[in-house]
Image (spheres, rainbow, N blue to C red):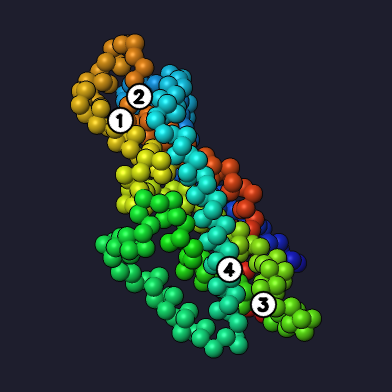
């Protein structure tokens, strides 16, 4: 009887401990979710709020004075649609070409029969950690006659070493029997890569595609370095950054933020675009395409990150 009571007591304590542990985990996860989602939600609320009213603060989850003026002024910016076309085409081309070149290089250097695969891999990995710097990189682009050309967005990014390591690790985890069987059937290496390897590494391809697309979409510094004197080649991020700087300069030249906030608190009827409001709207515009695409590749992203290091 005593043993039975001890058993039920121990079981009850275990259940209580599990419940307490689960509650703590859920509370921690809830805090993480709130801390992650709230800043972006607050940014959206500010982007739809009157710019002058935003300077008074106090905006949490919903706008206090609804307006579309921030987005109206943003999309009335000269060259905004041309810059959007440049960013979209650049993102698509860079993602497709970079992923293809990176995957085919990873396949070549994953073959054990390739004699130079180890020294070439070592050189590529070293280049990921050690680079010549900004000025030599600019001189290289200049000597390649890529300054002020659309190809400067594509050619220097054809191979990403970090993505190469991820894809090669994934390929190394595949059974060699797939490739050997294809060779026995008379398939050449290019056909093996396209029809055998590529369908098997779809999770890894989706993962590196997401990395590449996000990097290409958010990039503006290369536009500043190589195409700043070519307005037709300005990317969307560069135009948005320029617009933000212009709004900040206008704000500092007109009056200080304190005077603008005082005007808002006194009930002045204005519809001004301020740096904080335009910064919020720019953040939403720049982030929205990635948020739309990410749910479709999320499952591949998770699988690619976890399976890539598993070997048979």
Q: Earlier in the sequence, mark 1 or mark 4?
A: 4
* Real-space Cα separation, disc 1 to disc 2, in angstroms: 8 Å
> In this view of the protein, can residue 177 be seen by the observer?
no
Residue 180 location (% of width, % of height): 73, 83
* Real-space Cα separation, disc 3 to disc 2, in angstroms: 58 Å
Image: 286 above or below 203: above
Q: Secondary structure at mark 3?
A: helix
Q: Secondary structure at mark 4?
A: helix
Residue occupying image coordinates x 70% and y 72%: 191
Which residue is the extreme one toward the front? 145
Q: Residues within 10 Å of mark 2 (few under 14, many from 20)?
A: many
Q: Between tags 3 and 4, which lies in front?
A: 3
Residue of label 4: 103
Q: Earlier in the sequence, mark 3 or mark 4?
A: 4
Q: Work out whether residue 262 or residue 179 is closer to the camera in this orientation and state it.
A: 179
Residue of label 3: 189
Residue of label 2: 273
Q: Secondary structure at mark 2?
A: loop
Image: 199 above or below 285: below
Q: Quadrant of the N terminus?
A: bottom right
Which of the 4 quarters of the picture holds residue 232?
Answer: top left
Residue 215 location (% of width, % of height): 46, 53
Q: Residues within 10 Å of mark 1 (few under 14, many from 20)?
A: some
* Real-space Cα separation, disc 3 to disc 4, in angstroms: 13 Å
């Amino acid at each position: 009887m005593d043993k039975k009571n001890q058993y039920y007591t121990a079981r009850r304590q275990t259940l209580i401990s599990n419940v307490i542990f689960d509650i703590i985990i859920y509370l921690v996860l809830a805090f993480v979710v709130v801390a992650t989602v709230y800043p972006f939600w607050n940014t959206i609320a500010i982007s739809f709020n009157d710019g002058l009213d935003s300077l008074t603060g106090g905006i949490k989850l919903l706008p206090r004075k609804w307006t579309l003026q921030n987005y109206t002024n943003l999309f009335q910016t000269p060259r905004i649609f041309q810059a959007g076309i440049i960013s979209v085409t650049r993102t698509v081309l860079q993602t497709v070409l970079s992923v293809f070149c990176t995957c085919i290089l990873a396949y070549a250097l994953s073959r054990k029969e390739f004699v130079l695969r180890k020294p070439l891999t070592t050189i590529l990995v070293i280049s990921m950690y050690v680079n010549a710097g900004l000025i030599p990189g600019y001189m290289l682009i200049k000597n390649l006659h890529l300054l002020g050309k659309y190809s400067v967005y594509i050619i220097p990014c054809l191979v990403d070493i970090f993505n190469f390591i991820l894809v090669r690790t994934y390929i190394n985890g595949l059974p060699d029997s797939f490739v050997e069987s294809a060779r026995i059937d008379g398939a050449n290496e290019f056909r093996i890569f396209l029809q055998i390897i590529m369908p098997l590494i779809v999770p890894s391809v989706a993962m590196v595609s997401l990395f590449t697309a996000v990097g290409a979409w958010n990039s503006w510094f290369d536009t500043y370095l190589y195409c700043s004197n070519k307005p037709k080649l300005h990317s969307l991020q560069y135009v948005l950054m320029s617009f933000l700087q212009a709004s900040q300069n206008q704000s500092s030249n007109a009056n200080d933020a304190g005077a603008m906030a005082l005007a808002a608190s006194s009930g002045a009827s204005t519809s001004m675009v301020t740096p904080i409001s335009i910064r919020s709207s720019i953040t939403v515009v720049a982030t929205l395409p990635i948020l739309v695409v990410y749910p479709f590749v999320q499952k591949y992203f998770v699988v690619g990150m976890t399976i890539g290091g598993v070997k048979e």
